Image (cartoon, grey):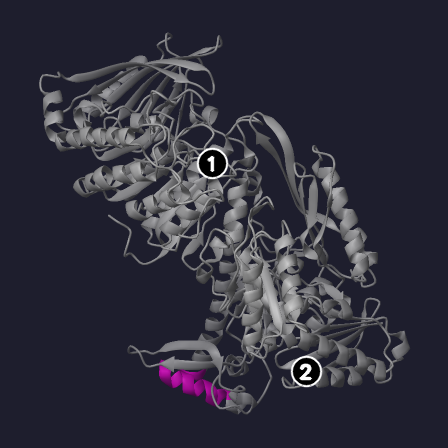
Amino acid sequence: MLIGIDVGGTTTDAVVVDGNKVVKTAYVPTDHDNLLKCMLMAIDELVQGIDTGKIERVVLSTTLITNMIAEGKTDPVALVLIPGPGTNPKDYSLGESIILDGAIDFRGKEIDRLKESQIKEAASQIRAQGLSRVAVVGKFCQRNHAHELLVGEILAAALPGSKIELGHKVSGQLNFPRRAATTMLTAATKDRYEHFAKDVARALKERKISAPVYILKADGGTLPLDKSVQMPVETIFSGPAASIMGVLALTEPGQSCVVVDIGGTTTDLALILSGKPLLSAKGARVGSLLTHVRAFAVKSVPIGGDSAVAVSSQGCCGCLAVGPHRDGPPLCLGGKGPTPTDALRVLGLSQIGDAAKGEKAMQIVAEGLGCSAKEAAQKVVDAVVDKIVFEVNEMFREWEQEPAYRIWEIMKKELLSARSVVGVGGGAPLLVPLVAARLGIAAMVPEYAPVANAIGAAVARPTLTLNLHIDTEKGEFSVAEEGITGKVSDRKMTPEEAERLARRLLAERAVRLGIGEYAGEAEVTYSEVFNMIRGWSTVGRLLDVRMEILAGLLPSWGRC
Amino acid sequence: MSSQGKAGKTGLIFFPAFDWAISPTHPEREERLLYTRDQIFEEGLMDLPAIEEYKPRLAEKKDVARAHFCVPDVESQVTEAHLIAAGSTLTLADALEKGEIRNGFALVRPPGHHSMRVVHGNRGFCNINNMAIMVEYLRTKYGHKRIAVIDTDVHHGDGTQDIFWHDPDVLCLSFHQDGHTLYPGSGFVNEMGGPQALARTLNVPLPPGTTDEGIHYVLDNLILPVLDDFKPDLILNSAGQDNHYTDPLANMRFSANGYARLNEKLAPDLCVLEGGYAVETALPYVNTGIIQAMAGLDYSHVKEPDYVPGRFVQTAEMKREIEHTVAQVQKIWEQRDELVGEALEGAGDFYRRKRRVFYDTDMINENQEEVVRLCPDCAGYMTMSTSAQRGYGILNSAFCVSIPRKACSSCRDDAKEEYAEHVDDKRIGYVLMQDKDKDRFKFYNNMTRTERGY
């Protein structure tokens, strides 16, 4: 039996899955001040009458880190940058930072040396500010870790008890400001996350649940809770990821669809193309910071069942606005103002809430628009559907417009079209058919749509990424994510050999992260090779391989 | 004309054609923009709010035919990589005209500025002229009248010069390393354009070893004042990067900072990458600097690892030589109207020019004769007889006719007659018609007796 729990914005949803069957579901209102408590409440409700010994796995999807960052409850961090030549670091919106001399170039060659006295000065500055967490990030340090390592060493010696995060351990991808932001966020959330992870482990032990506990990441993959403390930022936006994994679990394999998750105040849109959820080309944006966190391409539209409906008095006949804010629950459910939920009630599309109150809500709108309540309701629903349809089309357009750097990418990027709209979330059953009709494709609302997120968490398999960079002229390879470097002897190494090396390194990494049994699922998602020519001869090759275990479902689910 | 002060972003298309090369060890190979990719991605430039990245598109064959006579046809002369590089410039041109961006940089390869009006193959690493294709597109689609193309590549922009040789509304100004010492061996002060467009082609040959100081002297004392006089609707930069002091194919001493400052002062509306072959030591830094300068960002932190300000000092002799050349070109520019008047006086009804063109990359020898009608009512139609032999291989010959925008009826009729006369003439392989006025293009094959059009 598998347990999946998604701590969402308004409710915490939980399920027990056995094989390919949903055995039990539970809902608890989310208490933002005590996420652990509501999670445990959900578990307690769920396991009543269930043999906890038979639980094989527990997966949590939590808004902990997202909330922590949104509410500014992260720990203060000293950011130490080694930017080298290029952009003025002030042009990055990274906040205050200490800038060190020293530089590494794109080949990983040292082009400017560190100054030890400057590093020591930085240490006293950090001490004077009373900071005990430090993020050290250098440009191109993923190609040569020496500078970050040395700065880290000197700072650690000068600042006993401090915690130091190095950029190259956080991400191996190009983009220095994103690496800096991701490293800074890691340092800022690690302690509190670790605390939370320990609490969870203890609480489950108390409940005699000894199954391994996993956490869901933004890329729809799971990671053992105890290992995830190394990369807490990866757990942001796991809510939308849970829903998308849920849709993957509840629909036929290999299909292409638009995922529409209609909640109270926001609607999340995502794409599944040929059975694979579309990943964002770049990392996620967390608050004002752009990061390297791999995440599904999710578009949040500020519209939902509880969105406030207002009629502005501009012009003669009034202008209808739905959202973006929420003024409390729908009028038909005891709220104060009109909402799309009231409109659906009036049109007879839903039986939720009080009919008379719904009518009253639409009367308010009707007065502003100068029409009947029923017409007003229709206009409100049309406005919601219009907005969602517009954003779905925008999402396709944006995806088609993503830059490509090779001829085949431009020639082969066919226009994939979705076959259906799959709705999950509270507002889905009523609105998704209308959206699908407008898009001219089929609508589908799966049986367990309201708990799709929890199902997604329950049956998601682990994901893992490894970026391998090889420079055969220098005879070196480096794996950025772990700060591993090594030697290669063959100057004419082929992409196939590089991919074999990547596979071996990924398998080793998977074992270290406790997900060794999934290493076989890894695939090459990016591979490039360049001959380095100096004069008229080939002096070496640059090879880059990204190997990934992509988001997928546990084999035991095998629903369809 | 200057883009400064206009709100908006800098549009950027990065198309390194990582799967296209002339040959594996050729300077124009896959690796060329690899380290530039690494640098601008690592800098996170695409994430900055001042910069908007666009996706390239394929240029249409018609877009190519508007600028070139491709023999025997466009398909035979271009690969997808060429169409994407050219199409990238058009995407940015559209974004600029729609007001989405205030300026743009097409960081693309393969380059184009050595491609002339007639294309039999690859010359100087170029098959089709991205810049010229963009200029013709901007004029046809958006009706721009005056456009200035400033060629800042170390090699003379002979292809662009050739395409706009007779066009008084396109100013082609190229500064470059002296043609006595570098490919393509042209670009001297006395190359000034056809009789109707004299001094709208300006060439500034510079001595090998010219530094930031010398190039900025040319910019401040010649290029910027000429632009003030010419008052173009748009300023375009054929942005080669091989004036750099580390370039393996040339001998100048320009720095990344010098390039950035040049683009800041020139304030081009659109930049198109041309050459530049110091793939590790120059391109990553020069491109970063140009992007920053265009986006109004601080470029003072861009510095080649081995560069120290004041590293290169110009000799007094070099300084005198540059000042002398600038003075010569200034004089030509000042006398532009008299020059045209003199040239047209007693010139007759037609202007003729016979030339040989050598395609170094493809080893092709071309003979051509260009005839332009000196029409009092319009720009005058043009014909071009061309024959070219590739090594000892086949001889491709063509007769090409071009009808200018806003052609008078007499020129249009005569041009059509010329086309009709050469169709089915067995001595010529192909007959081409470029009707810029109606934006229609025809290719007739005299051997198969078939016509195709775009």
The range drawn in magenta is: A358-373
In reply to whether residue A436 is colored magenta, the answer given is no
| Amino acid on which the number 2 mark rests in the picture | Leu
Instruction: Residue B263: give x, y in percent of width and height.
Output: 33, 45
* Residue A135 against residue A304 in the figure, above or below: above
Instruction: Residue A452: give x, y in percent of width and height.
Output: 70, 71
Looking at the image, how many numbered discs can be counted on the residues?
2
Q: Residues within 10 Å of mark 1 (few under 14, many from 20)?
A: many
| Amino acid on which the number 1 mark rests in the picture | Arg
Residue at 56%, 51% (x, y): give it: A113
Q: Nearer the viewer, residue B292 or A499?
A: B292
**Quadrant hosting residue A348:** bottom right
The reply to whether dot 2 and dot 1 touch (C-beta < 8 Å) is no
Q: Residues within 10 Å of mark 2 (few under 14, many from 20)?
A: some
For label 2, the residue is A35
Q: Is B195 left, or right, of A247 in this rendering? A: left
Residue at 85%, 72% (x, y): give it: A1
Q: The residue marked by circle 2 belongs to what chain? A: A
For label 1, the residue is B109
Judging from the image, what secondary structure is the residue with disc 2 in? helix
Q: The residue marked by circle 1 belongs to what chain? A: B
In reply to whether residue A364 is colored magenta, the answer given is yes
Residue at 54%, 88% (x, y): give it: A332
Judging from the image, what secondary structure is the residue with disc 1 in? loop
Instruction: Residue A132: give x, y in percent of width and height.
Output: 62, 74
